[in-house]
């Protein structure tokens, strides 16, 4: 397990647009997906820090699931969709047992839901359809947050929205060590390609997908017994303190080092292919 910060010779700095006053808190708006299994774990870590003020969580609820499923099936096959669905169902059953049969507290459960986390910490959830809709991004921009933090948010933020939100520091959390595995489903691809390590990268949001300057990155070893779920969950649990420390540092100093990704080793991934699914299974991997 490694954490990389300030590691490049071409490092620069990103600055808060508004100077923090003594005893002030970093005002943060979070973007995430309603179906995200792993954003609640990171969110809980941030909400527990007294220096961080997660004021609102903007939640995208996906529409047009049938068309998305058709696209996934055409690329990945029915078996992939079935195995993912069964995997998610199993995890939800385990979390249900943890909550109701074992009476585990929220932070000890394997898969707490976003709505439970928000209720526990009294944080409003704001339902949105698309952050790129003018009413949505102008509403977020009008509140002049110090940071807009994307936690596994599934939409590309378009130039108009980026421009409107430029008074905030825009940060994305991506579950790989960039520039490797930019794009979708990076944890799956790391397992399918028998990588030894993967991790999580906090980077600035810029016009090109997952290409912005890196603030910090956490590297996690992949274990022979890892499933997609066990690896993804361990990444977010292990990397959460790094994300918190990065935000606190931004608050305390008014800036944070960052460095360019470069092009060496960069690749872009999307939905799994049938061939990748065969490699995934051949390596003995499962979703949960």
Image (cartoon, helix red, strand yellow):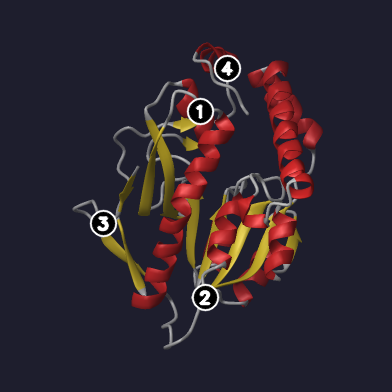
Q: Residue at x 71, y 65 (%)?
A: 120
Q: What whole-number distance in Å separates the C-alpha atoms at marks 2 and 3? A: 25 Å
According to the picture, the residue beneath numbered tag 2 turns out to be: 50
- Quarter of the image where the C terminus is located: top right
Q: Which residue is mark 4?
A: 277
Q: Secondary structure at mark 3?
A: loop
The mark lying in front, picked from 1 and 3, is 1
Quadrant housing residue 27: bottom right
- Lower sequence index among marks 3 and 4: 3
Q: Callout 1: 10 Å neighbours few (<14), some, many (20+)? A: some
Q: Earlier in the sequence, mark 4 or mark 1?
A: 1
Callout 4–callout 1 Cβ contact below 8 Å:
no
Q: CA distance from mark 3 to mark 4?
A: 36 Å
Q: Estimate the spatial distance between the alpha carbons at disc 4 and disc 1, rounded to whole Å.
A: 16 Å
Helix, strand or loop status at disc 4: helix
Whole-number angstrom distance, CA of label 1 to CA of label 3: 30 Å
For discs 2 and 3, the disc positioned in front in the rendered view: 2
Q: Where in the figure is residue 258, as x and y percent of width and height?
A: 32, 58
Residue lying furthest front in this view? 102
Indicate the quadrant where residue 196 lies.
top left
Residue 226, labelled with which disc?
Answer: 1
Q: Earlier in the sequence, mark 1 or mark 3?
A: 3
- Disc 4 versus disc 1: nearer the observer: 1
């Amino acid at each position: 397990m490694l954490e990389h910060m300030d590691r490049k010779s071409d490092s620069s700095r990103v600055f808060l647009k508004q100077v923090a006053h003594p005893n002030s808190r970093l005002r943060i708006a979070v973007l995430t997906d309603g179906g995200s299994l792993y954003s609640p774990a990171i969110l809980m870590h941030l909400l527990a820090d007294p220096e961080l003020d997660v004021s609102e969580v903007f939640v995208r609820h996906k529409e047009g699931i049938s068309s998305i499923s058709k696209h996934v099936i055409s690329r990945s096959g029915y078996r992939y969709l079935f195995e993912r669905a069964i995997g998610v169902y199993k995890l939800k059953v385990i979390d249900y047992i943890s909550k109701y049969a074992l009476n585990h507290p929220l932070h000890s459960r394997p898969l707490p839901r976003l709505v439970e986390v928000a209720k526990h910490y009294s944080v409003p959830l704001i339902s949105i359809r698309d952050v790129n809709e003018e009413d949505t991004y102008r509403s977020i921009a009008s509140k002049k947050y110090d940071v807009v933090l994307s936690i596994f948010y599934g939409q590309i933020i378009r130039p108009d929205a980026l421009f409107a939100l430029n008074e905030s520091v825009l940060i994305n959390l991506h579950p790989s060590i960039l520039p490797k595995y930019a794009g979708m489903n990076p944890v799956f691809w790391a397992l399918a390609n028998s990588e030894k390590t993967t991790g999580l990268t906090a980077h600035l949001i810029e016009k090109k997908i997952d290409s912005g300057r890196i603030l910090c990155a956490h590297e996690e070893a992949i274990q022979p017994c890892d499933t997609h779920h066990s690896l993804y969950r361990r990444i977010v649990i292990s990397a959460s303190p790094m994300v918190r420390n990065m935000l606190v540092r931004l608050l305390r100093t008014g800036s944070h080092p960052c460095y360019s990704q470069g092009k060496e080793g960069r690749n872009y991934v999307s939905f799994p292919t049938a061939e990748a699914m065969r490699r995934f299974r051949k390596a003995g991997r499962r979703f949960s």
